[in-house]
Image (spheres, grey):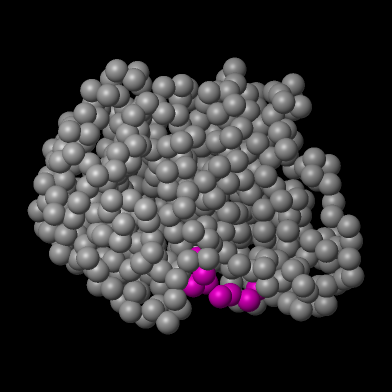
Amino acid sequence: MNKVKCLLTRRELLKGSAAAGGLAALGAPVSLFGQESNGAAASGFSGLSDSFGNRLITPGQEAYESSRLVWNAMIDKHPAAIARCTGVADVIEVINYARDNDMEISVRGGGHNVAGKALKDGAITIDLGPMHGVWVDPGRKRALAQGGVRWGGFDRETLAHGLATTGGAVPTTGIGGLSLGGGLGFLMRKHGLVCDNVLSANVVTADGRHLVANDNENPDLYWAIRGGGGNFGVVTSFEYQLHDVEQITGGVAMYPRDTLKDLFHLYREFTASAPDDVTAIAGVMVGPPGSPLEGQSAGYLAVCHKGSAADGERVLRPFKEFDPPSIDTIGPTNYATIQNMFATAGARGTRSYWRSNFVRELSDGVIDTIIEHADEIPLPGSTFMIEHLGGAVGRVGENETAFSNRGADFNVSTLGTWIDAAEDDKNIAWTRAVGNKIRAFSTGGAYVNYMAGDESPENVKAAYEANFQRLVEVKRKYDPDNFFNANQNIAP
């Protein structure tokens, strides 16, 4: 469904001081989506079920088993109910009901978080999935998106106008979790993290209030949600800054196992002087079926250059001339293609456990550790991934947003992905062990969106680094009872 065409005349939604009327105007969008037909009242949820009808899914109902699934198949949580919300009023009602009945809640946007924080045993899940409206104002280069939108849907609407913002490289990722945790993506060195492009947000707090958070209204809350995760409320909509993306050069190149050391040294040399126009990711993965590297550990590069085709060809030439690559898709393309390069990586239903480490330099120690374990990665979709930061990411001050690891030049992640549940213990242990080896070279911080579900409080604190104490203070103000605790938690 394309709401952009029919709703562009409503640009007042995006105009004015950070959409004080515009974002707030989404307070009751039920009429945009329609109510699902009412079913029998869910057992034990009298009152709440009267409003939600069959949008309140409880154990024993036919839809319950499929509704409790999230992207990571390792997550096997049994919420007391799943409330499929169509607007802010629904979210407020669930929060008030849960507090009045001494129940816990969790929040699901895209359900893509590797730690599975969208669900919690015995809690009510606030499911924002039905809230998937996107409104684009191409003249002002703004987009307004509800909390259940996923990046593939967001990109589809904005790219219809030749516009985009930094977003997730997997199209099924939800915009909410990625934005709240900081948000790495292929435009970050040119335009900053996802959270750097959030201009305003609608937030429902633990006491059931609906607040606008931006530079002018509740600025402390606005600061906290840009990197502090879902600790402070349910974000029901975001307003984003958009950018032109008419010319893109990029793609993926893969290289044989025996080139890894030289490849990573080339990558280190390239990133040391790379212009902000290019974001480059390097790593190790198993060659895809049907390729010359099928079943083999192989080095890869995934790159996106924003600018003229001539500049893109010149800047990325070192990667095309190295070795040369066994697989090479790097060339003039479009942003939609770039955003779908990893669409099949870690497909829904696979089992995943990750470790992330921010490092200030890609040292020989980091490179050697990756190469040492390159032949051990679990199948089918596991990878070592090195994401180059810097550029616009590093020019934002450490304390300007809650995302504080701005001084790191790279995020080095060990992403374990497999299928067989019988291999859980072995693969989790491997991911932990290798991740901990890399941590010896790190700043001590990690990317909160890549953190697993069993992180220690010390690791969570390190992820928020210098901003942790200020985040605690904001938490005390907006959620003193830690009502929102199904996250990488900041306790008040």
Task: Work out whether residue 164 can be spotted.
Answer: yes
Residue depicted at x 15% and y 64%: 372
Task: Judge left or right: residue 48 versus residue 191.
Answer: right
Q: Quadrant of residue 139?
A: top right
Task: Judge left or right: residue 454 versus residue 143.
Answer: left
Task: Judge whether residue 74 is colored magenta.
Answer: yes
Question: Magenta-highlighted stretch: main secondary structure?
Answer: loop
Image height check: is 234 above or below 10? below
Residue depicted at x 89% and y 66%: 39
Image height check: is 422 above or below 104? below
Task: Work out whether residue 193 can be spotted.
Answer: no
Could you tell me residue 418's position as x and y percent? 41, 69
Could you tell me residue 349's position as x and y percent? 53, 65
Q: How many marks?
A: 0
Q: Quadrant of residue 433?
A: bottom left
Image height check: is 89 above or below 164? below
Residue depicted at x 12% and y 59%: 368
Front residue of 106/78: it is 78
Front residue of 443/41: it is 41
Task: Judge whether residue 76 is colored magenta.
Answer: yes
Front residue of 334/484: it is 334
Extent of the magenta region: 72-79
Could you tell me residue 93's position as x and y percent? 77, 58
Task: Judge left or right: residue 410 versus residue 207.
Answer: left
Task: Judge left or right: residue 200 versus residue 282.
Answer: right
Question: Quarter of the image containing the N terminus?
Answer: top right
Q: Quadrant of residue 247?
A: top left
Residue depicted at x 77% and y 72%: 62
Could you tell me residue 453's position as x and y percent? 44, 69
